[in-house]
Image: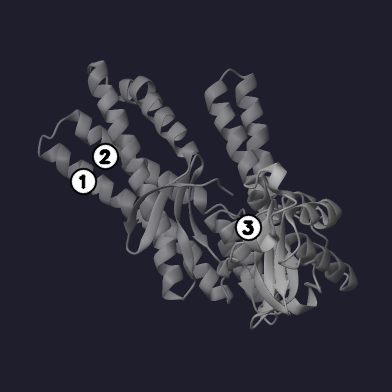
Amino acid sequence: MFGRSIPLFRLAGFQVGVDWSWLILAVLITWTLSVGAFPAYIPELTPGVYLAMGAVAAFGLFASIVLHELAHALVARRYDLPIRGITLFIFGGVAEMEREPGRPGIEFAVAIAGPIASFVIGFACWLLAQGAGAAGAGLPVVGVLAYLALINVILALFNLVPAFPLDGGRMLRAALWYWKGSLRWATRVASTIGGGFGIALIVLGVFRVVTGDFIGGMWYFLIGLFVRLAARASYQQVVIREGLRGVPVRRIMTADPVTVPPRISVAQLIDDYLYRYHHKMVPVVEDGRLAGCVSVKDVKAVPREQWAATTVSEIMRPCSAATAIAPDMDAMEVLSAMHRTQNGRFLVMEGERLVGVVTLKDMLKFLSVKLDLEESETLDARLTGIGAQDDGLGQRA
């Protein structure tokens, strides 16, 4: 969903980071509050005070979203669900779970934790606003606290909309999953509702733009677009997980992969292997054992005039242990490792012997055939969007 996030700090054992898009949101919120909302509701303050109020309120919203996602993460950890971290981005935040909950009850508990946290934060900010007003803290302080109380209630209510992947949509999915016993069916229904809700927001956004509210309309349009795309992507992810879970890598891998002996020249490597098979990394095997790996990057470090006199053994490197897997490893775990490491090509090893290679493209082809044979629902995008990424992932050594 995101690019590489900017790590900020750890909270309760979870890494908290921000996507660069959050910085845009922080600036927009600060500007909108300081020139629009606060001057309208609390007149006759100086521009500097309004700017300070907007900046503090934006920081308070940042903290509120982090606490909302922390609630999800803490409940997930309670049920032994691994969380990669908490990331804030332009449309909010997300606690990134590495796998789906195993039972509907767990899904419901994790989903509802966020809105409950937002309601609690909103009520706490309202109490603080009342106390600050009674203590004579001044309009700027009361105004910021009142804004945070209101925005947290709005955040909770919006997330309770039963449209996947919002929290309410996840709660609906949990109920449907419990009713029918099928995670895939429940996700399809909840995602369809989420897609419909996204379209409604897009239409509302266009209407508001046409009627003169350009900024507000664009926000509705972009949020609706995000909800619709996220709903479709979430369903695709579930289909992929369901299709690959329990399948050993040996059923998907390419057995007897292309390998090179260590004693051939770099010139031979280029002509007979790299140009012929179009691989950017090739395993080096000697006497049936994996001796190392050689890549285009290694070749480029050798001057062209030395290609004929230099052997592969002189430029090869040890293969990364992070890309070596066992043939009985679950395919879903391998796919998660590919996502985590941004490496789309793994070596399948039995001891020191290379028995195969598995790529992201191999896994997607297997999944497509499996879904067709089982007469299951095909992916909305026929996996083309994910398959296109293999060109980039599969080329990493």
**Left or right for 211, reference 150:** right
Q: Which mark is residue 375?
A: none
> Residue at horizontal 33%, vertical 49%?
122
C-alpha gap between disc 3 and disc 2: 63 Å
Which circle, 3 or 2, is nearer the viewer?
3
For disc 3, the neighbor class at 10 Å (few under 14, some 14 to 19, many from 20) is some
Q: Quadrant of residue 101?
A: bottom right
Q: Which residue is mark 1?
A: 128
Q: Which residue is mark 2?
A: 145
> Residue at horizontal 62%, vertical 55%?
164
Expressed as whole percent of the image width and height from the top left, the position of residue 52 reads 25, 27
In this rendered view, identify the residue nearer to me: 188 or 368. 368
In this rendered view, identify the residue nearer to me: 317 or 83. 317
In this rendered view, identify the residue nearer to me: 133 or 49. 49
Q: Which mark is residue 315?
A: 3
Q: Secondary structure at mark 1?
A: helix
Q: Secondary structure at mark 3?
A: helix
Expressed as whole percent of the image width and height from the top left, the position of residue 299 reads 68, 50
Q: Quadrant of the C terminus?
A: bottom right
User: In the rendered structure, which disc, 2 or 1, sits on the residue that comes first in sequence?
Assistant: 1
Kind of residue at badge 1: Leu
Kind of residue at badge 3: Ile
User: In the rendered structure, which disc, 3 or 1, sits on the residue that comes first in sequence?
Assistant: 1
C-alpha gap between disc 2 and disc 1: 7 Å
C-alpha gap between disc 3 and disc 1: 66 Å
> Residue at horizontal 62%, vertical 40%?
224
**Left or right for 201, reference 256:** left
**Left or right for 315, reference 26:** right
User: In the rendered structure, which disc, 3 or 2, sits on the residue that comes first in sequence?
Assistant: 2
Q: Could one spot residue 178 in this view of the protein?
A: yes
